[in-house]
Image: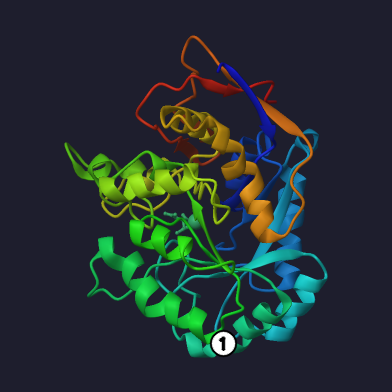
Amino acid sequence: MTQMTIRRPDDWHLHLRDGAMLGAVIDDTARHFARAIIMPNLVPPVVTGAEAAAYRDRIMACVNPSHGFTPLMTLYLTETTDPDDVAAVAKSGLINAVKLYPAGATTNSASGVRDLDKVIVVLEKMAEIGLPLCVHGEVTDPQIDIFDREAVFIETVLDPLRRRVPDLRVVLEHVTTSDGVDYVRSGGANIAATITTHHLFINRNHILAGGIRPHYYCLPVAKRESHRRALIAAAISDDGSFFLGTDSAPHLDAAKLMACGCAGIYTAPNTMSCLAHIFEAEDALDQLEGFTSLHGPGFYRLPVNEDRITLVKQDAPVIYPESRATPDGPLTIFDCGTPLYWAVQDAK
Ligand code: NCD
Ligand code: ZN
């Protein structure tokens, strides 16, 4: 196959930041994706409906309108979030989800949740109104090995929470382990998972063997190869519980290339090329549309996109720049480690 046309994709987990960075990155997503779930981990975080509305306006003021892009907003759950506020903001149509960050788990998560008991009333309200909870699924206990933090979270936090609020609809964000895949696969209709672009390409050797590669460092950190294989198997299956959430997370090179560098990988520009490559390598191009364009709207109970994009396989590799310029310095684009031949046709 050298050409394929699919429904326009959506990105169910995206960091756009704010200010100059927002202006530098927004069109990389909007060029290909119709909608994206916008993560609320700004500093300070997006906690109220008014803050989400203002952030949405700043995004719309930056994006090239010819792309026809719609940001799907989220609220950052804190221990003082009011359930009735969440319900009112959801009813107004402004937000499509609430994000749970265990306090300290990742970039800008200091205002996150320490004690789940304090947010149970919010979660019960969300269950009642069918509003999804997006979960950063890692424990923060320093005693727990970083490679085990997702599996331990599922067993000690997520599963007990779901038993306590069984009607809560949960997205396990950026799943990185076979434990997570198995849990979601057998978890019924109220659980789904996003899978990132980069976790389909890299395992922990890519980060650490033969030199340390900060541009491959993200959270949850990539695991061993058997886990990457489990993620690929989930992505290319026709199981509607798994869909694309790039977790494209821009950080300036200056913030990544230092003694204690930031977590996050910037995949927005070349995600569709990367995905076509890996689905083709798995002989599963026919499953790409489900993963990028059908399963996500299914879980979020939104209509699928009516417009289409065409991917074309070129004879020569598609050349992506190594980085994007921003007013504050360069931002490195994900290098998936192999030449890419699939390009999105007529991408503006
Ligand atoms: C994200 C970021 O930079 O905001 N970083 C990351 O490594 N994925 C936060 C997150 O999604 O954990
Ligand atoms: Zn993220």
- Res 44 seen here: no
Closer to the camera in the image, 17 or 205: 205
Image coords of residue 46 (percent x, y): 63, 67
Of residues 175 and 50, which is closer to you in this image?
A: 175
x and y percentages locating residue 184 in the rendered image: 47, 63
Q: Position of residue 306 (x, y in %)?
A: 79, 39
In the rendered structure, the answer to whether residue 248 lies left or right of residue 93 reads: left
Q: Nearer the viewer, residue 302 or 72?
A: 302
**Residue 238 shown left or right of residue 259 in the figure:** right
At x 61%, y 53%, the residue is 18
Residue at (41% x, 78% y) in the render = 157
Residue at image point 54% right, 46% down: 238
Residue 79 vs 289, above or below: the answer is below
Q: Using the rendered image of the protein, determine whether residue 59 is visible from the camera's viewpoint.
A: yes
Amino acid type shown at disc 1: Ile
Toward the left, the furthest residue is: 210
The local secondary structure at tag 1 comes to helix
At 51% from the left and 42% from the top, the residue drawn is 328
Q: Which residue is mark 1?
A: 120
Instruction: Give the image quarter of residue 334.
Output: top left
Q: Quadrant of the N terminus?
A: top right
